[in-house]
Amino acid sequence: MSGGANLPEGGKARRVYLLLRDALQNGAYVAGASLPGEQRLAETYSVSRATVRRALDALAADGMVDKRTGSGSTVRAPANAASTVSADFSTLIPQLTLMGQSTTARLLSFAYGPAPEGVASAMGLPGGERVQTAVRVRLFDGKPLSYLTTYVPESIARNYTEADLATTPLYRLLERSGVKVDTAHQSVTATLASPDVAEALDVSAGSPLLSLRRVVRDKDGRGVEYLWALYLADVFRLEMNLSRVAQGSERHWAPVIGGRANGETTIQ
């Protein structure tokens, strides 16, 4: 999938395009699956079928779906190489810092089933491997802050209950299950709120969010958790100190790390 630059005309069509593009990139629909029909999508996003059609045309132009008359739209397999531009902050370890008051979590769903294709691939799980999927909304000062979806291999997750997860941080439950968390890889991108996420976060569909994805591994390199966190854009801030450094005859900005540096992701 290209991630595309074929934005359709019209604000509503662009919003639907971006929401569907995010759903495709996030693995909501696997390659070869059919998207809901135009009428269903129009009802989901409260727009006309003509608007949905323009959004689907743009996705097809981006190579993300195949459109066939009478057959609807089918999801294409993602391209091997990602088209996003990324900065290398591999030595910077962001930390979530809560300012003033602690957060609480509300558990929305808790179930077991096969891992989504993208999740299984990222965690290094065999196809069809069963995971526990939990969806929570985290509250800060009584207001929705983030929408969290976690995937944990069933062999680990069976060591705690739905009630445990509703009251205890997941990392504590993993440790209690004997997991020795060792490393993690995470990325942060911009996205838009889908209707269900918007309802949970009490914002309008299409509102800007920051999407954080993290794969956590144990000391043997096995994937033990996949986190997809969606944060309200106005309560998430990335801070770091930078230093002007030389590389040959060129100079550029680089994060200052260790005793000389400070880098953190702050919820305010």
Image (cartoon, rainbow, N blue to C red):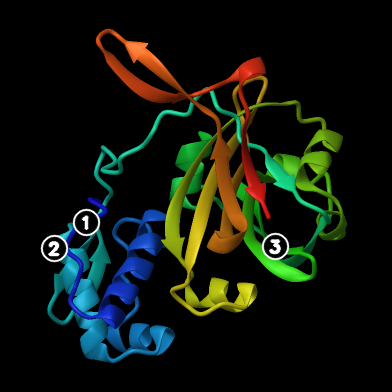
* Residue labelled with disc 2: 61
Viewer-side residue, 195 vs 110: 195
Label 1, label 3: how far apart the Cα atoms are = 31 Å
Type of amino acid under label 3? Arg
Q: CA distance from mark 2 to mark 1?
A: 8 Å
Residue 225, by quadrant, is top right
**For the residue labelled by badge 1, is the local secondary structure a helix, a strand or a loop?**
loop
Indicate the quadrant where residue 146 lies.
bottom right
Question: For mark 1, what is the residue?
Answer: 4
Residue that mark 3 sits on = 136
Q: Earlier in the sequence, mark 1 or mark 3?
A: 1
Tag 2 near tag 1, CB within 8 Å = yes
Give the crowd class for mark 3: few <14, some 14-19, many >=20 residues within 10 Å: many
Residue 19 is situated, as x and y percent measured from the top left of the image, at: 38, 69
Report if the CB atoms under discs 3 and 2 are less than 8 Å apart: no
- Judge by depth and name the residue closer to the eye, 9 or 23: 9
Q: Secondary structure at mark 3?
A: strand
What residue type is disc 1 on? Gly
Secondary element type, mark 2 = helix
Quadrant where the C terminus sits is: bottom right
Q: Quadrant of residue 149?
A: bottom right
Q: With respect to residue 200, does 44 lie above or below?
A: below
**In this view, 105 is above or below 73:** above
Q: Which residue is pictured at 19% across the width and 58% down the height?
A: 5
From the viewer's perspective, is the residue at label 1 or at label 3 nearer?
1
**Front residue of this view, candidates 262 and 67:** 262
Q: CA distance from mark 3 to mark 2?
A: 35 Å
**In this image, 12 relative to 218: left or right?**
left
Q: Position of residue 119 (x, y in %)?
A: 50, 46
Please determine whether, in this image, residue 86 is positioned above or below residue 230: above
For the residue pair 217 and 210, the one nearer the viewer reads as 210
User: Compared with residue 137, is residue 90 higher up or lower down, i.e. above or below?
Assistant: above
